[in-house]
Structure formats: C-alpha cells, structure tokens
Amino acid sequence: MSDEEADVVVIGSGMGGLAAARAIAQFGGQRVLVLEQHYTLGGMTHEFSRAGRYRFGTGLHYMSANSGPFLGFMTDGRAQLSLLPDEYDALHFPELDFAVPATEEAFRTRLKERFPAEAEAIDDFFRTTRRAMAGLTARNVLASFPAGIRKATAPLVERLFPSTFRSLRDQVLRSFGDPGLRAVLAARWGLYGTPPASSAFGYHAAVPLTFFMDGTAHPVGGPQELNRVVLQILRRYGVVLRPRQRVHEVVVEGGRATGVDVEDTATGRRYRVRADTVVSAAGVRNTYALIGRSHELADLPEERSAVMLFLGLDRSPAVFGLRGENHWFMPDLQEHDSGPRPPGEGTLYVSFASLNNPAARFHTVELLELVDPRLVDPWRGTPEGERPESYRKFKDELTERLLARLEERWPGFRETVAFAELATPLSFETYQHSVLGSFYGLAATPRRLRSARAGCRTPVKGLFVAGQDAWGSGVVGALAGGLMAANAVLRPRQLGTMWRAIRSGATARDPAVPWEGYLRVAGIEMLTPTVRRIRLAPLYEDTMPFSFAAGQYLKVELPVAIEPIERSYSICSSPGESGFVEIAVKHEPDGLGSGFLHEELEAGLALRVSGPHGAFTWQPGSSHGTADTLLLIAGGVGITPLMSVLLAAADAGHTGRIVLLASYRTANEVVFGPELAALRSRLPGLEMSVFETDRHGRIGSDALAPHAGPTTRVHLCGPAAMMQDLIGCLTELRVPREAIHTEAFVSGRSRETRREKAHAIAVAAAAAGVTEFMIDTDGGAPAFPCSPGQSVLDAANAVGVALPQSCGEGACGTCRVRVLSGAHESDDRGMFSADELARGWRLACQTLPTEDLVIGQ
C-alpha cells in the first residue's frame, strides 16, 4: 500500500467537511486533503439531471433569507438568494389551513388572530423558544471543547435551559390548550427529521421557530451554485479535493489518529494518507465504524430516512395559483400522538424550486416524506440495477399515492407531470453513504443532546466530527458543525482570527478579479434580422455589481442543455451606465449559443455571467485617448465593442478625432444605425463611413490611408480574414504595431475544436512513447515542459513562467508569442497579418506543440 502525507484529512465533501477544510487551511495554514466517496463533490448541495432538461436538488430546498455570517464566510458573500413568497410555508391539516409569514412578529400576530384565547400563552411560548435556542447553542459550542470542560458544563446547561431538552410534544402540551395551536407550532418537524414525541424542543426552536423567522430563500442557480462558489474558494486556499475515494479505516496508533486507509474506487488503488488530524464529515455513526467502535453509539435512537419524489412538469405550477411557497400536508391535528403511518400517508413536504430559482428553465417539484428506514429491508443488500420486480412495484405504487395527494389538493396537477422518479432510503444509503439512508444525521432527541458522542469531539485524539452531527440539520447547520470542528482543531490565536473574520462579514471583492454571478435578462431587442441586443440587469438591486471599460466583454453561461455552454460576448453599452449592461449577438447558422439566445431566451431568466474580461479597451482621459486619431474598424457585428467605445467617448465629452469604418454585406445588416446617427451630435470629431461589401467591396488601403499614420490608435474587430488583411495594410501605412488593438470573433466551436486537436496530439504522442515536449525561450528563462495536448500558455502557467495573457480563449490577442522553431498546431484568430504569421507570431493560448519548441516575444 502506497503512502501519502497531509496535515489534515477531511472525510466527506458536504458543507460541514468543506467548512472545516477551509477554516483549517485558511487560518491554520495547513495542507488539507478532502476525500469524497461520491463521484461528485458537495454533499447534499449537488444536483442531478433527468430527461435532458430537469435539474433537482438533493438536500437543500430552502434556507433562511438571513443566512447569517456562516454562509457569508463560506461563499465570500457571493451567494445570491431569491426570496420565497412572504407566506413561505402553507400548513394543511384536515381541520385547518395556516400560512406561516416571514417574520416572528407577523407570525405571532397571525397566531393571536387565529387563536385569540391563547394570546398570552403565545408570547410566553416565544420567550421559551428563545431560551431553548440559547441552550442548544451553548450545548453545541461547549461540545467542541475538551472532555473535561464538556463533562463539567453539560449538567449546568441542562439546568439553565430545561426547555432545550424537553420533547417538542411535551413543550406544546405545557404551553397550549388549543389542539389546533399545538398542531401549528409543532408542525414542520420535517426540517430536522424527528417527530414531536421524541424530538428535543431545542432543535425545533432553532430551525422552524428561529432560523426561518427572517423569511426564506432559495439559491439563485440552485444548490449547486453554492457548491461551485465554495469549491472555487477552497482551491484558492490550496485544499485538494478528490472524489471517488472510499475511506475504509481511520488509522489509530497509541490512541491517536495518524491517517486513513483509502480506496480510489475509479481505479481500485489502495493507499494510506498519513496525517496528524482527521476530520470526518461522514456522520458520527460512520466515523465510529471507521475506528471499530460502533457499539459505543448503541444508546442513541435510530434515525429516520426519507422517500423523495422528483417531478418534472410540462408547464408552470403557477397555473394552480402557486407562487413558490412550500406546502406541508399533515394527516391530522394530533400527529404527535399518532403512531406510524403507511408510506405515502404521513407528513408530506412539497417544494417548488423552479418557481424560486430565476435561472431555472424547466419546472420541477420535490416531495419529501420521512420514513422508517426498515421500510426497504426486503431489498436492502441487493445491488442497484439488480433489484427484483417487487421493488419497482413498491416504488410505482408509492409514487401514485403521493401524486394522488397532490391531485386532491390541486385538481389537474397529475396531467402536468412529464417525469417522475422516486428515491428511497436505499438511494440515500448509496449516494449519501449514510447509515440506513439517514437523511438528517443523528436523531434530534434529548438523548443526543446528553450524549458525549454527539458532537465534534471523539475519544480518539486527533479525530473530529464535522457536519450535521456536530451542530444541527440542514446545509447551514452542517456548515456550523464544520466550524465547530475547526474550533476544536485550531490553536487559540488562530481561532481568534477565524471568528473575527466570520463576524466581520464577507470578504470584500477584489476589483481586479472578474465578477461572477447571475444577472437578469431585462430586455431583448431585434437590431437587424440576425442581431439581437440583450440587456442584463442586477437580480434585485439597482446598481450593477461591477464596472467595466469600453471594449471589454462578458462570458455568459447558456443553459442550452443539462450542462451549460460558455460563450463570450462584447459589451455594447456605455461604461457610464450603472443600472444594466448590454450585449449584441448575431444569430449564426447552427450556432448553439446564438441559437439559444435568438430562439429560446426570454426576459426574466437569470443567466450566469463573469466579467468584465479583455484588454481591447479605450478610456477617455487616459493615455489611451491621446492619439491624434482614434480609428475604429468593424466588420459586421464586430462593431459591438466599438459601440461601447463611442458611447464612452460621448459621455466623457471627447472632442478629438474619431473615425469609424464599418463594413457589412448589405444595408439590412447595418447594426446600431439609429444610435450612431444620434452620436454625431455628441461627438464633434466623429467621422463615419459604412461599406456594403456586396456593392463596394471590403475595406482596403485606400479607405485607410486618409486616417492611418504614426499617431493613429486603431481598434479592429471583425472576421479573421478581414483582420489579417487590415493589420498588414495598417502596418504598411506606418501605424505602429503596438497601436493596433484587435479582438476576434470566437466561434462557438473554437474551444471544442481546440480540445479535438489536443486529443489527437495526445493520442499520437502516446503511440510514439512521447510524454512531454520542452519549450525553450530565447530570453534566458529556463525551458519548461508541455504535456502533449497542452497549450503553450497552459504549460507556462503550470510552472510559473510569466506570459502576457487575458482571456485565454483567443479573443483578445494578449498572449502573443513568436514560435522560432518547432512544429505545432495553432489558430491565429486573425490577430496577425500574413507577414507576422510568416515570422512566427502566434497566440500562446491556441498553440499546441507537436514537438519541442523555441519561443520568443
């Protein structure tokens, strides 16, 4: 068995494990390795897709609108949340309906209006709730301290906060006489998974009665967006993340954890990672199994699992009057006194994620019912895909029972269902790797609160628990559990730094780093039969989250399929406009991205955007604006970034000479005609000429000669062939090469084509026994290796060789290098003249060596 080393190993990549990993890496400066048994990272924040269109969350359905400092810390304030309706939880009992409003004050007022005889008791109950919440917090924080402190303080916490340790049923019976009021306040125990008769009131006080009292929200882009942001940040702190890694044992030597034994399930390789600290976010039961001490948990009650029904609809559920609120269906008012019910007939939770996610294109519904995991015992142990027909029949019958409950509430709902799939405890056992498919970790009982085993500490030195079992249920509860594990691992001085950072709020965004997030499609306008202008605005604010320079572009993710594609589009609006940003897109034949934007995009959809990018910029008042003549040359929709330059000049009151030469095939293809006409009055130095190439031919030296010379600054954007010719013409007209700024159209297939070339090169090299090429430089820097199929730019970045760069995809032309010798595949994107190409100039991001190279600049 081979060995590796790390300072800290984290088992599991749920939010608890990731929180512990980040805190320990960031504040402890330690090398952290995260091992995840699943093929995807992120635990219950990951999503899955079905039928080529529907995306479903696995564990996060809604969260507090005021998610507090923990989530802000984990996402660096980048989490974008979409608010649920004010009445976010609709409770349905056979005898009454009750809508839960978004604040504690409104909730209490509504309770008093509905149950006026219990008004004083309601106020007393909420005071008790605050005490119970405080008690749970005290218990969980103290549980992160060493054994001596835990043992001494545990009885004191229970004496000071007795309501924390009572059952939910006991507390509502003590507080109220009205059975309807008891039912309303005991409802929603499904948020942490333990029924009222056995759940500790502290957990109920924390989740439905405190955490959600500031309103609720859903992540824009779905739970996977939180996952994406968090993983980006962890990689920035050097955390290594490995999926498909099954930990078989935590190695314990002399009473201390010294590492883990691991199997790479993708390859079958077994290896040991030596580490002084192990943090398990796999749950207390799995953790104790890994050290051979499961018997020590025998006093803890069994946990519930769940069945979840995932539905894809062929129309919006809004047709039934739904606005995105959750619906809870309770079998009766006295649920806390009733016994187990057949599956499909118990408390049912229904959520409508697509109504709350402005980035969702297709509508989905998720139903959840907590069940006894023994429900699927007849099929437990049978391999997935080989289970008998009786299992499929069980799932089909249960699906129909659940659908019947929706149909009863909303007649006609069944007809809208285009896709249905049921997950059972066996599903959670397989994918979540939880014991018997436990959905929320350890049962939220008084016995758990009193147990020394339920928390982030273990009897083994150097072994800690993160996640839901270290704090409480849900994604943010798991996150808090991860921070409790870090609280136990880090040194006191490091802890002080950590908690100060968390309390101070989100990290300020570095303006030098492109912004990433969602913008709303606020408007769509046809400029020509083939060009659309698309306005993107902030989701909920009045001001754009970033500024840009004229000539820059955005990268936009387009949800054309389950896996989105990314395309780059130049900004055509003014940098001075703070309320929106606009792009113009030409509909290319068979273009996947432009086809979506022209044929399917609708106002209101949220698109994921990053930007601004690019160095094809001009800024009035800077050195950029000192040229005697600013010559702007556009081919077709290449006028898009130049439109932004003209608007920036007009907004700044620029009076210098600006010449615009724009070519189009026909008059019908002229873009921004009215806008350009309006700019004439705002830019006294503006000269414009439009060329219809079908009638007049392309722009050539004759058209350039009156405007080009040694003091001219040129911005050129258009098709590759046009740009190549014009660069040569401009050079002949004595325009300095450094004054010619270019931006290329990037084909929708450009990245795919480069990958195809890279694959072919890698295959050919492997067949020839070649493992790397060497790239030498004529500037004295050491040669560096390049793997077959790797670009020169990627190879340089991998070893820290500094090359100029910006977009990385051949649009901006920044990464110019000269290939002095050696064979290669490349795409110049029209960034060079024929003479420059002959002299070896290439784009490093597009150049793939096929033998050793020598490059210069």
Image (cartoon, rainbow, N blue to C red):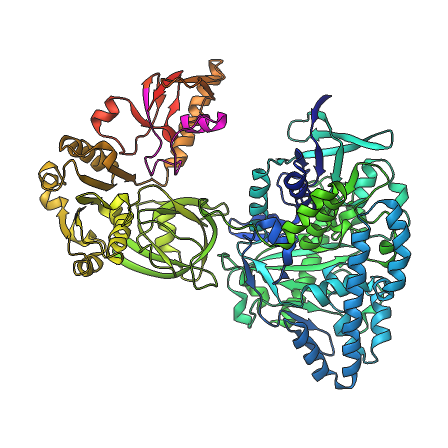
Q: In the rendered structure, does residue 807 fall within the stretch colored magenta?
A: yes
Q: Which residue is drawn at the image coordinates 14% and 51% (left, top)?
A: 688
Q: Residue 15: percent from the left, percent from the top?
A: 66, 47
Q: In the rendered structure, does residue 105 fall within the stretch colored magenta?
A: no
Left of 680 or right of it: where is 264? right
In front: 486, or 433? 486
Does 780 appear above or below 600? above
Does 98 appear above or below 271? below
Q: Which residue is drawn at the image coordinates 74% and 34% (left, top)?
A: 247
Q: Quadrant of the N terminus?
A: top right
Q: How many dots with numbers?
A: 0
Q: Quadrant of the C terminus?
A: top left
Q: Residue 679: percent from the left, percent from the top?
A: 20, 58
Q: Residue 569: percent from the left, percent from the top?
A: 35, 47
* Residue 166 visible at all: no
In front: 839, or 569? 839
Q: Residue 523: percent from the left, percent from the top?
A: 36, 62
Q: Residue 288 lies in what quarter of the image?
A: top right
Q: Residue furthest top?
A: 769
* Residue 435 visible at all: yes
Q: Residue 634 lies in what quarter of the image?
A: top left
Q: Which residues are magenta?
A: 792-819
Q: Residue furthest bottom?
A: 117
Left of 30 or right of it: where is 225? left
Does 2 appear above or below 444? above
